[in-house]
Image (tube, rainbow, N blue to C red):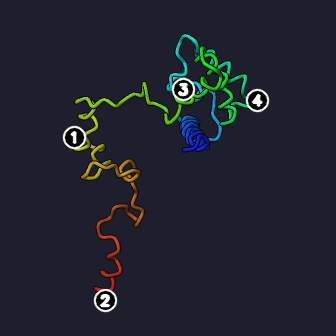
Amino acid sequence: NSPEGAAAGELSALEEAFRKFAVHGDTRATGKEMHGKNWSKLCKDCQVIDGKNVTTTDVDIVFSKIKGKSVRTITFEQFKEALQELSKKRFKGKSDEEALQEMYKLIEGKGPGLTGVTKTVASPTVSRLTDTSKFTGSHKERFDASGKGKGRAGREDLVDNSGYVSGYKHAGTYDHKVQGSK
């Protein structure tokens, strides 16, 4: 095990964490750049913010300082710069290199947590109201026997314009009757 190989392994774990947080909550994100909101989330979820040495304000200030003037995101290289800046504050008694390694250890291999996400509640009231087998009248027509919705066909009265009188039972029998009487 060479120290270079270990550094490369750590870097990929750090980059993986960066990418996970960069795409979190944004369907169009590529994972190459990170928004300030996701940077703050990374710092909270990975315990970079400890409330004493590093606060949310510090994190926001470092983000603003590192990113370009007219840009709203940071790259992976800028992300490492920002971590270096924060590591000095977070691990005060250690050398810059040690502090940076400690900071990497906090983040490596982590992904965004789903704290505070609302879960659906299965209450008897809701299940009674959404049970399609108990629907009556026109609402019953909107679902097939399995309880799956029929879509547009279940919502609209589809008009049968196949003849002079709509819905005529003996449609298409005229020619048969006329030829049968000859």
The residue that disc 4 covers is 68
Q: Are marks 4 and 3 in contact (CB under 8 Å)?
A: no
Q: Which residue is mark 1?
A: 134
Residue type highlighted by circle 3? Lys
* Mark 3: secondary structure: helix
Question: How far is mark 1 from mark 2, CA to CA?
Answer: 55 Å
Three-letter amino acid code at the position of disc 1: Lys
Q: Is residue 50 visible?
A: yes
How far apart marks 4 and 2 lie (CA) works out to: 92 Å
Identified by mark 2, the residue type is: Lys
- Residue 149, x across and y down, in percent: 34, 49
Secondary structure beneath dot 4 equals loop
Q: Earlier in the sequence, mark 1 or mark 3?
A: 3
- The disc, 2 or 3, on the residue closer to the chain's N-terminal end is 3
The numbered dot on residue 182 is 2
Q: Nearer the viewer, residue 44 or 53?
A: 53
Q: Earlier in the sequence, mark 4 or mark 2?
A: 4
**In the image as oriented, which residue stretches furthest toward the front?**
1
